[in-house]
Image (cartoon, rainbow, N blue to C red):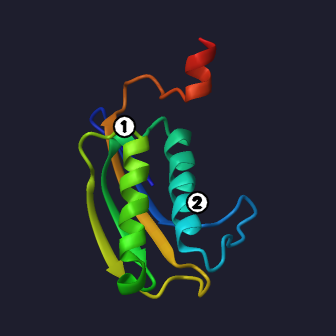
Amino acid sequence: MRLDIKGVTILLISGTASIDDRGQSIHIGDFRAQTKRTYENITKLLKAEGATWKDIVRTTCYLRDIERDYEAFNEERTQFFKEQGLDRLPASTGIQAILCRPELLIEMEAMAIFDAERPAAKDSEEEEAA
């Protein structure tokens, strides 16, 4: 959901998981691969709205088995945010939950806030070509 309020854009991204472009669950049984794909999917959603991970202010992460997977999740999250060049990490909450599909091990929500008037974010390939 996109909200534009007095020059500020708020993006509410919900229920994102390890799903391919056809809507099929992928990386069944591989928690780390599912986590990476979930981040990739959120990245695509952000880009479509002219945003990046630097605009994310909060994430909520639902893990099917938090005791088993939290350490791996924290490692993947820390590495991903480092790759994004984030010097301040967004607020984050981890919750154990039954997810919408039994094969999914992780699902994420994210909230981004940014100036609605700024130019759209460019990806690395576009910046290199310029």
Three-letter code, disc 2: Arg
Q: Which mark is residue 14?
A: none
Residues under labels 1 and 2: Cα distance?
Answer: 19 Å
Q: Which residue is identified by label 1?
A: 85
Asked if residue 35 can be seen in this view, the reply is yes
Would you say 13 lies left or right of 103 here? left
Q: Position of residue 91 (x, y in %)?
A: 24, 57
Q: Would you place residue 25 above or below residue 12 in this image?
A: below
Label 2: which secondary element: helix
Mark positioned earlier in the residue sequence (1 or 2):
2
Residues at discs 1 and 2 in contact (Cβ within 8 Å): no
Q: Dividing the image into 4 quarters, which one contains the C terminus?
A: top right
Q: Position of residue 29 (x, y in %)?
A: 62, 80
Would you say 78 lies left or right of 25 here? left
Asked if residue 9 can be seen in this view, the reply is no
Q: Would you place residue 49 above or below residue 63 in this image?
A: above
Within 10 angstroms of label 2, few (less than 14), some, or many (20 or more) residues?
A: some
Q: Quadrant of residue 18?
A: bottom right
Q: Which residue is identified by label 2?
A: 37
Q: Dividing the image into 4 quarters, which one contains the N terminus?
A: bottom left
Within 10 angstroms of label 1, few (less than 14), some, or many (20 or more) residues?
A: few
Q: Nearer the viewer, residue 113 or 79?
A: 79
Q: Would you place residue 18 above or below residue 68 in this image?
A: above
**Point 41% across, 41% down: residue:** 84
Three-letter code, disc 1: Gly
Q: Position of residue 80 (x, y in %)?
A: 43, 51
**Point 50% across, 56% down: residue:** 39
**Point 57% across, 68% down: residue:** 34
**Point 44% across, 22% down: residue:** 119
Label 1: which secondary element: loop
Would you say 21 lies left or right of 84 here? right
Would you say 50 lies left or right of 3 here? right
